[in-house]
Image (cartoon, rainbow, N blue to C red):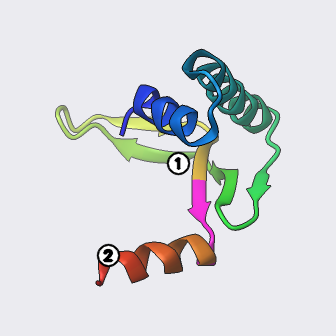
Amino acid sequence: MTRAQIAAEISEATGISKKETEIVIEGFISTVIECLKKNDSIEIRGFGTFKNIVREPRKARNPKTGETIDLAKRFIPKFKVSKEFKKVVQENLTK
């Protein structure tokens, strides 16, 4: 499902215009990105948690050339699904 399809479904369900819905979705996405840029986490109960995972510096190998390279410390954004969310999906997919 694309961002436009999500906006259309929310618009249809709530009666809010599609344009306004797209603005809200953009606002949500930019808020999540800004929080993760500050290394904050976001918890939405019943949905999941957005947070950064720290990857420590290490040596790696370029598979094409075999050359060893040094990877710096980096932060990887991660989304962890809540137990309730996971349970609902499992129940509906096993029917």
Q: Kindly state the secondary structure of the residue where label 1 is placed.
A: strand
The nearer-to-camera label among 1 and 2 is: 2
Q: Residues within 10 Å of mark 1 (few under 14, many from 20)?
A: few
Q: Kindly state the secondary structure of the residue where label 2 is placed.
A: helix
By secondary structure, the bulk of the magenta-drawn segment is best described as strand
Q: Amino acid at mark 1?
A: Arg
Horizontal and vertical percent position of residue 60? 39, 45
Q: CA distance from mark 1 to mark 2?
A: 40 Å
Part of the protein shown in magenta = 79-83
Q: Quadrant of the N terminus?
A: top left
Q: Which numbered marker is on residue 58?
A: 1
Given residues 28 and 57, the one toward you in this image is: 28
Horizontal and vertical percent position of residue 78? 58, 51
- First-in-chain label (1 vs 2): 1
Given residues 43 and 90, the one toward you in this image is: 90
Q: Residue furthest front?
A: 15
Residue at 51% from the left image edge and 80% from the top image edge: 87
Apparent side of residue 75 relative to residue 8 in the rendered image (left or right): right
Q: Indicate whether residue 47 is drawn in magenta.
A: no
Mark 2 = which residue? 93
Q: Amino acid at mark 2?
A: Leu
Horizontal and vertical percent position of residue 3? 46, 30
Apparent side of residue 79 relative to residue 66 in the rendered image (left or right): right
Residue at 82% from the left image edge and 34% from the top image edge: 38
Quarter holding residue 24: top right
